[in-house]
Image (cartoon, grey):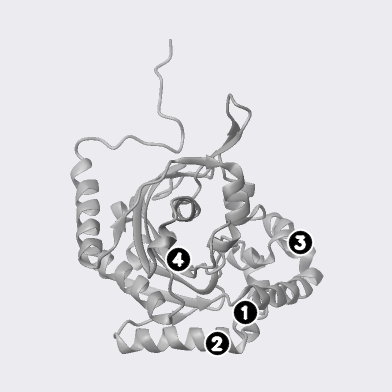
Amino acid sequence: MSTLQAIRGTRDILPAESPLWTAIESLSRQVLAQSAYREIRTPIFEQTELFARGIGEATDAVGKEMYSFEDRGGRSIALRPEITAGLVRAFIQNKLFAQGGVQRLWHIGPAFRYERPQAGRQRQFHQLDVEILGSRDPRADVEIIAIATQILKALGLKALTLDLNSVGSGVDRAAYRDALVSYFTPFQGELDQDSRDRLSRNPLRILDSKDKRTQEIVADAPSLLDYLSDDSQRHFDGVQQHLTNLGIGFNINPRLVRGLDYYTHTAFEILSSDLGAQATVCGGGRYDGLVAQLGGPDTPAIGFGMGIERLIIC
């Protein structure tokens, strides 16, 4: 009889490693408690519809990578591929919005995606999520970025850079989507297979392609920043100004769009040069429409996710 092994893409956290995991969690808790963020815990599985509606069926996270199944009651259930959608569901279901004001919440736990395992990326991975719900002010965007930076520095990471972009409003993005389709269509035969599939479903994701020829084509693609409305541009200018006031350096990356449909306005990633090709240790952005989209009141929000496995290998 063969020896049973852990499922590919999962791993055991052994006693020799546990103190490092505990230290990361403890330091994160300390920073977040000092900044008046409150912990929330949500189930690791939800109705599949939550992720299809919230994240978007055309995204890789839902369309290609999500673990979904039918339970014994005939309901379609999914292991969460990310944490924000479930947190927003809990925010609505438990009427946390009725408390008024701005809600500062955080969550830590596993999430699941069926993708090729590699350094710092497993099919069961662990993520710290930090969210602000209830503020449209650009200062909330900067607070989230500052908290992420503070946590990473508390963990001893030094070689950090911040990439920043605006993905605008839904109207801005629709206009940009049309521009990308018009631009990429003549090159359709030269794009990699994933990008050809994304051309009609989610053309913004072509910008993330790692294929060499596709990247050459992407280099001359229209910039999303040219399609921002006046309101979107003012918000983005405000974020940049507040970051500058706090002495937080940043690079404008007009190709940074993030992979989930709910993002609006600010999108960002924090990278560490210590990680080589898989350099992103934190990513997030604003998602002003998600709460209303999932049946709650109109509630602007912004947050980030930080992969614990990535932090372990830094």
Identify the element where label 2 is drawn: helix
> Residue visible at 31% across and 74% down?
146
- Residue 250, image x and y in percent? 39, 81
Spatial separation of the CA atoms under disc 2 and disc 3? 27 Å
Location of residue 44 by image quarter: top left
Q: Are marks 2 and 4 in contact (CB under 8 Å)?
A: no
| SS at circle 3 | helix
Q: CA distance from mark 3 to mark 1?
A: 18 Å
Q: Return the x and y of residue 164 as percentages of the image width and height.
A: 46, 77
Question: Quick check: marks 4 and 1 in contact, CB under 8 Å?
Answer: no
Identify the image quadrant of the C terminus: bottom left
Three-letter code for the amino acid on which mark 3 is drawn: Ser
Disc 3 vs disc 4: Cβ atoms closer than 8 Å? no
**Location of mark 3 (residue):** 200
Visible in this render: residue 155? no
Number of numbered markers: 4
For marks 2 and 3, give the one nearer the viewer.
Answer: 2
**Image quadrant containing the N terminus:** top left
Does 310 appear above or below 17?
A: below
Separation (CA) of disc 4 from disc 1: 17 Å
Of the numbered discs 2 and 3, the one sitting upstream in the chain is 3
Label located before the other in sequence (2 or 4):
2
Quickly name the residue at label 1: 224
Badge 3 local density, few (<14 within 10 Å), some, or many (20+)? few
For residue 224, side relative to residue 36 (left or right): right
Q: Nearer the viewer, mark 4 or mark 1?
A: 4
Q: In the drawing, what numbered circle is on residue 233? A: 2
Q: Earlier in the sequence, mark 4 or mark 1?
A: 1
Three-letter residue code for mark 2: Gln
Which residue occupies 52% across, 41% down? Answer: 46
